[in-house]
Amino acid sequence: MSRIGKLLGTCLVSGRWYLVILSCLPACNLYSETGKAIVKEKDSPVVIEGTQRLIVHSETVGGEYRIDILLPFSYAHGKKHYPVVYLTDSTDFFPTVAGNIHLLRLTGELPEVILVGIGYPEGSPVMALRTRDLTPTLDNDYVKEARSDPYFPLPAHIDPGGAGKFLRFVQQELKPLINSRYRTDRVDETLLGYSFGGLFGLYVLFNHPEAFDRYVIGSPSIWYDDGVCFRYEAKYANQNRDLTKRVFLSANELDALEDPDGIFRSIENVNRMESLLRSRSYPRIRLNSHVFEGETHQSGVGTTLNRGLRFVFDRLH
């Protein structure tokens, strides 16, 4: 399997999850009997309580996004303004993150937040579009291999390197929309990303750190374009003496099992990034890094995003 298939095919396409999840059971007749249980309705969608959905057209990017929103249970009962968590790869991750946020809130391990998931409308070429939006540069070696990938070929009309445009969409179009429709705390915004989403998080952290207050950067694709994020980090360090952010970095112990050629070097790259950030002695950075024992790139999604949110909101004990 190519490195593109290893990275994408196993981590994001093991199941396409949506805000409305259609049952995969065979259709059944009204009042049909199965054992002792009587089915009173045909298959119906499973809806996540407290969620809303918007389809938003971006003039900046020139395309549409599916925006899934989870409101806190208390939202309808007061005038409080809430921190906002922006999640990339929402097409796949929103149900997991939304359910976990509810649970963590019930036990006091997270404050009440508004979750805003950024994904793509049904029927979109999700893998290609996320590659366009979450990568900061045009990596020609990657493009050559991605175009011919047998599992998820990158179409000829879609190129990587659109992270700058995607960030402008988030900053100039999406955030104003969310702030106008919901009671948001505009000075408490978190970016939550995994894999290519983690790569995007590092790009934003070092080039536009003011965009968010908290960063959860899970299993980031630091290998992309010869480690371009290390160059971003060095440039930031040369021009700045502080980084007033809460940052969570992670990798997974079993990533190496899916990377026998040593291309991605997930643990090595995350450890190197952590060491560089600590070596800068930024006075006000709050940094935590963790390698998840027994987790693969796929299985580490939930554990990473949960632990990362608890850390950046200062609820990790």
Image (cartoon, grey):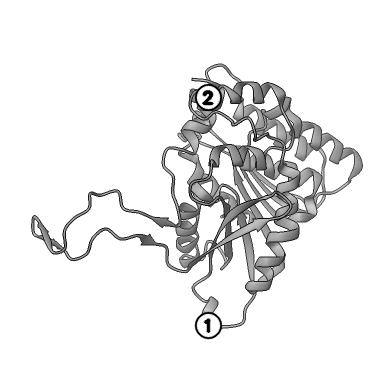
The residue depicted at 53 percent of the width and 20 percent of the height is 2
The residue depicted at 56 percent of the width and 21 percent of the height is 148
The amino acid type found where label 2 is placed reads: Ala
Q: Note whether 249 is above or below 108 in the view shown.
A: above
Outermost residue toward the top in this view: 261
**Distance Cα–Cα, label 1 vs label 2:** 48 Å
Residue 77 position, x and y percent, is: 53, 82
According to the picture, the residue beneath numbered tag 1 turns out to be 77
Name the mark on residue 203: none
Q: Nearer the viewer, mark 1 or mark 2?
A: 1
Q: For residue 122, say whether it is visible.
A: yes
The residue depicted at 91 percent of the width and 42 percent of the height is 239
Q: Which element type, helix, strand or loop, lies under badge 1?
A: helix
Q: Note whether 191 is above or below 250 in the view shown.
A: below
The answer to whether residue 171 is left or right of residue 48 is right
Residue 226 position, x and y percent, is: 72, 24
Q: Which element type, helix, strand or loop, lies under badge 2?
A: helix
Crowdedness near tag 2: few (<14), some (14–19) or many (≥20) residues, C-alpha within 10 Å: some
Residue 275 position, x and y percent, is: 73, 34
The amino acid type found where label 1 is placed reads: His
Crowdedness near tag 1: few (<14), some (14–19) or many (≥20) residues, C-alpha within 10 Å: few
260 or 252: which is nearer to us? 260
According to the picture, the residue beneath numbered tag 2 turns out to be 256
The residue depicted at 49 percent of the width and 40 percent of the height is 300
Image quarter of residue 162: top right
